Image: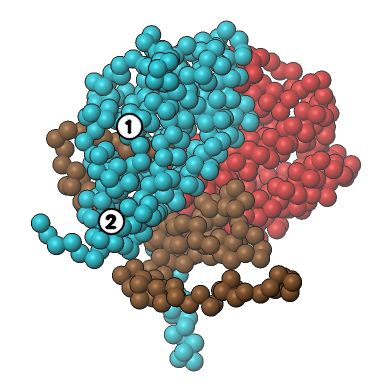
Amino acid sequence: MSYSVPEVPGQDIAADDAPRSSSTGWPLWEVFVRQRRGLSHVHAGSLHAADVETALQNARDVYTRREEGVSIWVVPSGEIHATDPYDADAMFEPFADKPYRHPTFYEIPDEVGYM
Amino acid sequence: MTGFATMTDPAAAYVLRHGDDNLVLAQRLSEWVSLGPELEEDIALANVALDHLGVATHLLGHASQLVGGGTTDDDLAFQRTEREFTNVVLVEQPNGDFAHTMARQLFMDAYQRLLWEALAVSEDAILAGIAAKAHKESLYHFRHTSGWVVRLGDGTDESHTRMQAAVDNLWRYTGELFEMDDLDRQMVESGVGVDLGALSGPWLHAIAAVAADAMIALPDEVTQRGGGRRGFHTEHLGHLLSEMQWMQRTYPGLEW
Amino acid sequence: MTQTTAGETRFQTTIDADDKVEPRDWMPEGYRHTLIRQIAQHAHSEVIGMQPESNWITRAPSLKRKAILIAKIQDEAGHGLYLYSAAETLGVSREDLVDQLHTGRQKYSSIFNYPTLTWADMGTIGWLVDGAAIVNQIMLQQTSYGPYSRAMVRNCKEESFHQRQGYEIMLTLSRGSAEQRALAQDALDRWWWPSLMMFGPPDSESTHTEQSMEWKIKRMTNDDLRQKFVDMTIPQAEYLGLTVPDPDLVWNVEREHYDFGDIDWDEFWTVIKGHGPMNRERIQHKVGAWEDGEWVREAAIAHSEKAAARAADTIDARGAA
């Protein structure tokens, strides 16, 4: 279910969003699910659990209860290292001008058949 | 309505008692929905409840076929009285705190793991099929529950005290799991049923292993309270049924 | 006028291209705030929304209905969880958000502040409340924030059975006894108007809609979504043979939409401000469960710390040997 709830007129929204309690909850884990044998594990989402066993069990209950998987990985969220989006141009754009890596770059006569 | 009081078909009565265990336990577990200690555990408990409800539905369905005369699984669930329910009294005990629910569940998971394994080779092929599926579920339940018993037993001082109290309180209902009555003996002879007495050793072994990890002391010999198999329940079951059966009793004979 | 930074430019380009904004991207503070608020409210709605239905689990009239209801409410817990996860990518913790719900600083949908009085309410919640939610969530699959959009895709996929099971309950009742038809009509009478209120105040009074539309957080306005829902639902009500409690309801040939009567916005604001029929009970139930569970959550953490310490000791011992 869903919907955004309007704020009551006169209420200060910015103050509302300010976190006030300190976090002492269960740690956050990222969940990766292999949908079926032969496929890679794919990020499914995250969840909270106190330890690795419960993280795996909760992942099973939360992310595979409609038979979405045959294998699960869980990783502490803090252990995920990512590329910097600011760095995206330097990281990924250099690959844009190298069409010779792709098979469609080459012209092979039809008579040769499938290659 | 006491039409089911004399369950003349022993095979039906036998299937039904195991169905009742699962139905009543599912009803109790479903009371946890929206009250779990964290969202993840709310979801996990609902899955366990759904597993037990599924097994109950299969077993009551099978029993209703054996009873015949157009009886349905819902008739057996919603039209029988307290005296006609034959579940063990352990499963009707109130949820209490999370430790009590886990203790009750641990005792049942360890028992059902053995029970379903044995019933999976029953001469009653339908019962055997249901048991084989339930066995896989019980293996998972036991893993989930024993993990929690260890976490609570070997967690904080408060959780340890609560876990120990729960084991102490519910221990007196565990003896009934392994009691053999005439029906059990008859079913063992015909190759349909299980020798429950033979399960108690492995059960205690499994429980003791979990208890050791959980730093929980198992109670000494205590006077056991059984009686559920012959309809001699604790006072809790009547209330559970009056809630569960309320719709069918208020509006008799309707489809929903 | 502040200078436009590279981040701002990139953000605007992403929005303009209908691309998704991802967690580590630069985003305007207002965008982040609006998303946190909206996703948190959405998550709270899923979780509080478990209560009106769990009220009927133990009394469900058949084994099949009991199983369906448990599975459905379990999905709602799952949807709440996906949404909290999406909010957490914005730098808030679930604990903080839950705390804001418990202390009344964040809200949830007004619809869950109405009581479920009969079994027919399980039908109307599935049919109308989930129906309205689906209209909203289908729109939100296109929202500009990646994690929110992905959570919505998952929700919608799972939620398709929710509305159908609700309508099936209504169908069974409307084809049943006179008493059952009366239950169905009574439930529709009570839930119709609150369902329309779920889409929020009219566009003329909705202060944040314009900015949210610009940021492509929302892709349709409250009134447009409401109209879509009414147009979809009226034929379904007619098929059930039930009467929608609105004497002004009429098909407008020119607009090719239904015209419908005025919504009682005073009632809406009363409920939003916390004075609806069930506001107090819903929060009390939620806070009670959270407090009762505290020792369990603490025990799990304590145990994991003990286990980690023991593992470290074992390694030390091995190293010393």
Residue C98's spot in the image, x, y percent?
A: 32, 47
Q: Quadrant of the N terminus of chain C?
A: bottom left
Q: Nearer the viewer, residue C5 or A52?
A: C5
The hue of chain B in the figure is: red
In the image, what residue occupies the spot 45% across and 70% down?
C307
Residue C183's spot in the image, x, y percent?
A: 51, 14
The hue of chain A in the figure is: brown
Q: Circle 1 sits in a helix, a strand or a loop, which is it? A: helix
The hue of chain C in the figure is: cyan
Which chain does tag 1 point to?
A: C
In the image, what residue occupies the spot 47% across and 30% down?
C131
Q: Earlier along the polypeptide chain: callout 2 or callout 1?
A: 2
Residue under label 2, please give it: C12
Q: Nearer the viewer, residue B74 or C38?
A: C38
Q: Nearer the viewer, residue A3 or A61?
A: A3
In the image, what residue occupies the spot 43% across and 67% down?
A76
Q: Is residue A39 visible?
A: yes
* Residue A104 to residue C83: above or below: below
Residue under label 1, please give it: C222
